[in-house]
Image (cartoon, grey):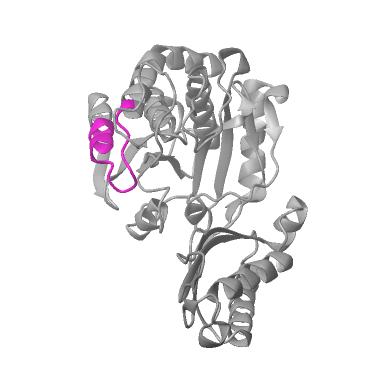
Amino acid sequence: MKQLIKVKSDEYFDDVVAIRRQLHQHPELSFRERETAALIKHCLASKNIDSQSEIAGYGIVATINGNSTLHTPHSTMALRADMDALPIQEQTDLPFRSLNEGVMHACGHDAHTAMLLGTAFILNDLKDNFSGTVKLIFQPGEEKLPGGASLMIKEGVLDDVDMIIAQHVYPDLPCGEVGFHAGPYMASSDEVNITVKGRGGHAAKPVERDNCLLTAAKIVTKLSELYPENDINACKSDGLLCFGGFVANGTYNVIPSEVNLKGTMRTFDENKRKSMKDNILKVTNEIAEESGCIADVFIEQGYPSLHNDVALTEKCAAIAKNYLGEDKVRDLPQLMTAEDFAWYSQKTPACFYRLGTSNPAKSIESKQHTGTFDIDEESMKIGMEMMTFLTINLL
């Protein structure tokens, strides 16, 4: 089976590279993936793979039924790839660089989509070798709340699914390696919005105005003391709260009547998630009241924590070692970053693993969400093979 998968991977590799490059040249932002979806549908139809489209916008679900009768009971397994791009200006010199100004596949979703199509081609050819059903989920809007995953779930894509897996490009690992983490892997992510209001006025007349800017600064300082970011282990344990927006719009001698703060809060535990929200509200209101100001707090709920099912993830890691060798499979640490695949992991046993994509010898080292991000395309061959081998073994 390993050799057969490698042969098939070689057969489709050039096609998958071409698909990835076409997607990279024509990136589309979250929930606007019209041409991306059209290309996916065309590729699936070319192999006579059944699919449904326009799920949660431009989402697509394809289905491949195994023909083997050797294994019972039959299971349904989902494979997921996201397909949206980011509002980032590309800064590479790739011959297939983005043609859409200010939009770029800077997180590898072009590769995810291409690899899942390649996996679909291989599984479709090898369907006599497994039983059960494979659902291939091509998902829009991973990068934008509420997340395409949550919307596709609402439309029933997981109703008959027994397990789901996804792989994500990872420049922290070299091409040729994969990585797994069982249990809570990625943090929840909520957007914190605080508006401090008061009387604006002349800087030289403090009795005639409040100081919203100073009040906002005290709020940021106090919350930063409660959730310090200088110890990543403490952040993983107690939660991370960090502000990236502080807008006052005053000037030298004008104190504004309103200051806006924007931040992110992250944790691996739902109870701590709630306590963090309570603490933000309490601290903000207390400081605002002491300063004679008013504070409005709005915390927009984002993605939950991504939980890799322990039994499924350990099994996937063992299968990966069988295929690649033990020296190519890494144990990964928890990450404070977030992923909307978390929505799937809250509903059914899930495994979200990493595919190494960097190659210093080719000067491919840039991180995701940067204008210079790229992958070693050889990693896509491993990605196709890995997802195919996992699927056949798990089914």
| x 48%, y 64%: residue | 251
Q: Is residue 27 magenta?
A: yes
Looking at the image, the residue that sits furthest to the front is 204
Whole-percent x and y of residue 217? 61, 69
Would you place residue 159 above or below residue 316 in this image?
below
Would you place residue 360 above or below residue 344 in this image?
above
Along the line of sight, the residue nearer the viewer: 114 or 35: 35
Identify the image quadrant of residue 330: top right
Q: Is 228 on the left or on the right of 24, as rendered?
A: right
Whole-percent x and y of residue 372? 49, 28
Q: Is 169 on the left or on the right of 66, as rendered?
A: right
| x 55%, y 18%: residue | 2
* Magenta residue span: 25-41
Along the line of sight, the residue nearer the viewer: 340 or 41: 340
Along the line of sight, the residue nearer the viewer: 390 or 73: 390
Q: Is residue 302 magenta?
A: no
